[in-house]
Image: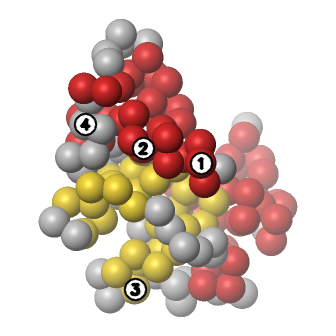
């Protein structure tokens, strides 16, 4: 099975200059936990709910004054749609990340989460959580 068979679409992306309040509003409205951050139209990083909590709230920053580029996780680790689910599991495990954006020819086309991967490869649960 390939990554393209299990990835979620569409992927939500925001520009690096976007304020965290807008990102949080979009996450809430769409019921998602992360967004890919772009710079000049190219994928540059990612922001999760956890990033907002730890990098904004715990540091007493104002979300209405904080830009995405200030808190995004970067560089972005991506995977190609033709990669196997096993390759994706190994990459996510090695990099200790929970979401892998799927990029084809430099274009963001989807995202694969830990949940997507473990549903197909439950034997990797030990790698992720122990």
| Residue mark closest to the camera, 2 vs 1 | 1
The residue carrying mark 4 is: 67
Number of numbered discs visible in the structure rendering: 4
| Mark 2, secondary structure of its residue | helix
Does residue 69 lie above or below 45 as drawn? above
Residue in view at x 36 percent, y 36 percent: 20
> Horizontal and vertical percent for residue 103?
41, 78
Residue at image location 34% in from the left, 56% down from the top = 14
Q: How far apart are the alpha carbons under marks 3 and 1?
A: 27 Å
Residue 88 shows in the view: no
Instruction: Establish if 10 lies above or below 64.
Output: below
Image coordinates of residue 72 in percent, x first then y, are 33, 42
User: Which quadrant is the C terminus positioned in?
Assistant: top right
Q: Earlier in the sequence, mark 4 or mark 1?
A: 1
- Badge 4, how many Cα within 10 Å: few under 14, some, many 20+? some
Q: Nearer the viewer, mark 3 or mark 2?
A: 2
């Amino acid at each position: 099975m390939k990554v393209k068979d299990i990835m979620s679409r569409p992927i939500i992306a925001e520009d690096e200059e976007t304020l965290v309040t807008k990102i949080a509003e979009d996450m809430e409205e769409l019921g998602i936990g992360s967004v890919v951050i772009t710079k000049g139209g190219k994928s540059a990083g990612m922001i999760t709910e956890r990033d907002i909590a730890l990098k904004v709230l715990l540091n007493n920053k104002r979300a209405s004054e904080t830009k995405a580029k200030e808190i995004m996780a970067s560089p972005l680790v991506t995977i190609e749609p033709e990669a196997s689910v096993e390759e994706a599991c190994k990459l996510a495990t090695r990099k200790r990340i929970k979401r892998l954006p799927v990029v084809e020819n430099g274009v963001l086309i989807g995202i694969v989460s830990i949940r997507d991967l473990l549903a197909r490869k439950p034997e990797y649960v030990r790698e992720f959580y122990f």
